[in-house]
Image (tube, rainbow, N blue to C red):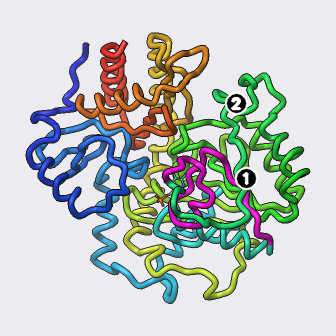
Amino acid sequence: MKRYPFPRIMTRLPGPRAAEIIRRDEHFVSPSYTRGYPCVAEKGRGLILTDIDGNEFLDFCAGIAVCSTGHCHPEVVAAIKAQAEKLLHMSGTDFYYKVQADLAKELNRLAPGRHENRVFFANSGAESIEAAIKLARYKTNRTRLIAYIGAFHGRTLGALSLTGSKVVQRQGFAPLLQGVTHIPYPYCYRCQFGRRRGRCDLECFRYLENILFQKTVPPTEVAAIFIEPILGEGGYVVPPRAYLQALQKLARKYGILLVADEVQTGMGRTGRMFACEHFGFVPDIICVAKGIASGMPLGAMIARADIMDWPPGSHASTFGGNPVACAAALKTIELLEGGLMENARMMGNYLMSGLRRLQERYPVIGDVRGLGLMAGMEIVKDRRSHEPDPKTRDRILDMAFYNGLIILGCGPNSIRFAPALTVEKDHVDCCLGIVEGILRKLS
Ligand SMILES: Cc1ncc(COP(=O)(O)O)c(C=O)c1O
């Protein structure tokens, strides 16, 4: 078996310095965070993350799909430094500055569809969703919203009202926004209507059109439908193209705005700038964050120019569109278009075929799916019944960490592979080798 210079684990995990940080963190930091294993990051370069004891991990999570250009890409760091020397903050709410206008122009150029767009800048994914909720209500003068079971749109109260991923995220926080209806996501491996992939009449879509819109939710009261073009936190689920096409038609018919939450799928990760492009899906509003600025906090709500006509003062953010974050985003876009998006497509295919090979050998892998570098693998007790196996999924994540591979779960029983878009063949081979070693031990 080929040997790689990574990962390099030299101490017991957590090492002594990591253990000390974890003790401090447990004492002073909010217990609401969801740490699965004791990873205490110190520095990163590309795909390699070094912990505080000097252990080097192979990182296939990229700060939850954020560090799109790899940890501390030298060109991004240089752009950040140059901007930081000039202007750290001014607030785009009350003042103008070049990098914010430049980035808005770039996002307008990149967004799918032939229409002109305008951009609202925020600091995070949830904030970009909040902005979209407000704009959709403002523009349509309607209140109702539709979102999906399994969807994750963030944890602020508006975004949380749309999130339908895990009960713990909502429990204790009611009342949330009124008028939100959740419908089943087109999740073919676990069809809520008991159908088989490719052998259905898009029953999940018919449910929206023929049941919901006929019986409980007047479509003319719906401001917007929020959809992740690939379900992220909910399990890396890729919907059928026909579903998104039908949804687009239905929304246009009733004047409902379509909001694509591309917070996780966007900025080149799937091999196209926006995942919507794979499906010929042209939303009215797109929300992005995560990978947009390679790790700097930035969110954006990109909307058709004729929709974003709200008046001064109706929405704004002190920090949104921070100049340093905008400079990082401009450099990130340059790198994505300069080859990383293409690499995401190629390495995504390579990773996916490796995962499919593992699926042939190990029956715990029920499903393998994804697009580009958003690859998911669902762990089951039984391939026939598709019975989920969250315990084994958690063990795999845990064992991966102790073997030097950083991966995260998604959905109740899936594993996601979301490395930086700079990932190379050796990284993928090493990752697959570690995962296979674990699966062999568990079988
Ligand atoms: C699809 C999607 N939307 C929204 C969010 C919320 O983003 P943030 O955590 O930056 O608020 C996330 C975060 O995981 C996400 O994956």
Left or right: 97 as drawn, with respect to 278: left
Could you tell me which secondary element the residue under label 2 belongs to?
Answer: loop
Q: Is residue 136 magenta?
A: no
Measured from the top left, where is residue 165 in percent x and y? 56, 47
Q: Identify which residue, 296 or 190, lies in the foreground.
A: 190
Determine the residue positioned at 56% across, 51% down. 152
Which label was assigned to residue 440? Answer: none
Q: Residues within 10 Å of mark 2 (few under 14, many from 20)?
A: some
Q: Do the CB atoms of the residues marked 2 and 1 lie less than 8 Å apart? A: no
Could you tell me which secondary element the residue under label 1 belongs to?
Answer: loop
Total labels: the figure holds 2
Q: Quadrant of residue 82?
A: bottom left
Determine the residue positioned at 81% across, 61% down. 256
Q: Which residues are magenta?
A: 142-168
Q: Identify which residue, 133 or 77, lies in the foreground.
A: 133
Q: Is residue 413 above or below residue 29?
A: above
Which label was assigned to residue 191? Answer: 2
Could one spot residue 37 in this view of the protein? Answer: yes
Could one spot residue 99 in this view of the protein? Answer: no
Q: Identify which residue, 245 or 165, lies in the foreground.
A: 165
Work out whether mark 2 precedes mark 1 in sequence or the reverse, and give the earlier one.
2
Q: Name the residue tied to disc 1.
A: 282
Q: CA distance from mark 2 to mark 1?
A: 25 Å
Determine the residue positioned at 58% across, 21% down. 386
The C terminus lies in quadrant: top left
Q: Identify which residue, 133 or 194, lies in the foreground.
A: 194
Q: Is residue 146 magenta?
A: yes
The three-letter code of the residue at mark 2 reads Cys
Q: Is residue 104 above or below residue 280?
A: below
Mark closer to the observer (2, 1): 2
The N terminus lies in quadrant: top left
Measured from the top left, where is residue 175 in percent x and y? 61, 67
